[in-house]
Image (spheres, coloured by chain):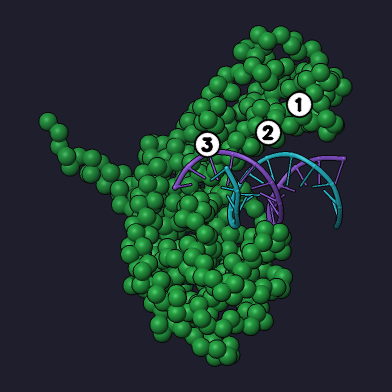
Chain colours: A green, B cyan, C purple
Amino acid sequence: MEISSHQFHLLEQLNEQRKQDLFCDCNILVEGKVFKAHRNVLFASSGYFKMLLSQSSKETSQPTTATFEVFSPETFMVILDFVYSGILALTGQNVIEVMSAASYLQMTDILNVCKTFIKSSLDINEKEKDHYLSLSAKSTNSEPAHPSLYRSRRKAKSNPRRSYSVPDEKTNPVNENSWSSYSSYLSSQVILQRAETQLSKRGRKQGSTRKRRKHLGLSQTQDFVQCKSNKTERAGGGGSASDSGHISRVREEAEFNAENDVDHDNYGYNRESEVIPKRWSLTFYLYFSVTDDLPRMRFKCPFCTHTVKRRADLKRHLRCHTGERPYPCEACGKRFTRLEHLRNHFQTIHQAGKLICRKCKRHVTDLTGCVVQQGTRRYRLCHKCLAEANFDSIPDDLDAEHSPVSSTGNKCSKWALEEEQKSDEETMEEEPYNLVVRHVKDAIPDEVDEKVKPNLR
DNA sequence: CTGGGGACGGGGCCC
DNA sequence: CGGGCCCCGTCCCCA
């Protein structure tokens, strides 16, 4: 006989214990704030904690401490509350960061809920597409604003890094839809700079444009996506406007005004926020730019001001916002947004695809060098560097391929040990790989190849 | 401190 | 529409 309320009461009791700090044996430090929790609960809820706690399971007498700098305490609070209650307090403001954190913590349930949340938001706004389309057609006839006007404003919008995760509602009058206001906020942070450079660049050789773009719109998303890295803050927007196209800048400005309620009297042209719904910037809408007197339809990202010509490109672009990385490297666990990135990674990192000696950087062939393997990482060494690295005693018979030779001990040179450490870091500290040095014939895939190739197709 | 190079991410666009 | 290629920007490491 099953008593359905048991699970609920159990969780409730655990939650009470957590709140009263009873039997808590795990401290989680998030940006300086300490959260108490139970190891077994975390273990059962998160793949990340499962790995972490299983590694430290021998030292059960002491409370485990985990430190995170990759998401905010508010975000972790949402996740921890979910773990202990089954209730996920998802809002438009926190969904991206919660999703990012859930991805980091390997909590697929939350991840899926976040995806659904985002998707449903997009679906809702897809319905508004037609409406906005007509509005868009109106606004394309407007005269572009003078670039210098944007430049002067940009300075006041530096360093949006942390602030956008919790938008200030006072500056964002659109509160009836929190998701909308969040997206609008994101957009507004980059809108000025993007308006200068975006879309009107027809050619591909626009390095300066790319540079600005990296510094502006997408640099924000990396904070979400690349949780693992402790990257230094990127420089703020720079450079001057060199844009001469006729994109609908006024729309962009109208968006900024509408969403941020800023004083725009100094800009000398009409705002259009009156005719544009306040939620339009959220929408996954079609976007018309007028260049060469030909209207060009584009798809706009709901998260930023980026537009693309094809829906598929937008889908690809959205991954940089959602943090979705559907292509895992099965050799090292690193995940990629695109198959080609995975392939490049795998070829260079795990297949020693480059015919360059890792140490002396000279060109090597199968005759002048060989492949050395450390963990899942492979690279080539010329015979000379191989000898210097003390790897020359490793037998080069093919049997070694399937019986990894651990060369810990006096076979490891200092250089090799450093390489090993680096290798471990680059494999996201998944497993402490032994230093394995093998002579590998590229034509004969070993077990790693066999395992990964199906992914590569 | 700085320049070079590797790894990786992202955009445009062709097939 | 997805796959793939090319190109470029950024970050990081190292000499």
Question: Distance from label 1 to label 2 (Cα)?
Answer: 10 Å
Q: Are marks 3 and 2 in contact (CB under 8 Å)?
A: no
Q: Which residue is mark 2?
A: A348
A159 with respect to A364 (left or right): left
Residue type highlighted by circle 3:
Pro
Residue at the extreme left of the image, as rendered: A1
First-in-chain label (1 vs 2): 2
Callout 3: helix, strand or loop?
strand
**Where is residue A52 drawn, in percent x and y?**
50, 36
Is A65 placed above or below A395 here? below
Q: Are marks 1 and 2 in contact (CB under 8 Å)?
A: no
First-in-chain label (3 vs 1): 3
Label 3 neighbourhood size at 10 Å, few (<14), some (14-19), many (20+)?
some
Label 2 neighbourhood size at 10 Å, few (<14), some (14-19), many (20+)?
some
| Chain of the residue on which disc 2 is drawn | A
Residue type highlighted by circle 2:
Thr
Residue type highlighted by circle 1:
Arg
**Where is residue A178 drawn, in percent x and y?**
37, 67
Nearest the viewer among A37 and A189 is A189
The residue positioned 64% from the left and 64% from the top of the image is: A202
First-in-chain label (3 vs 2): 3
Q: Identify the mark at residue A328; answer none if there is no mark.
A: 3
Callout 2: helix, strand or loop?
helix
The residue positioned 49% from the left and 65% from the top of the image is: A297
Nearest the viewer among A418 and A302 is A302
Is A440 placed above or below A247 here? above
Q: Identify the mark at residue A380; answer none if there is no mark.
A: 1
Question: Distance from label 3 to label 1 (Cα)?
Answer: 24 Å
In the picture, residue A122 is in which quadrant?
A: bottom left
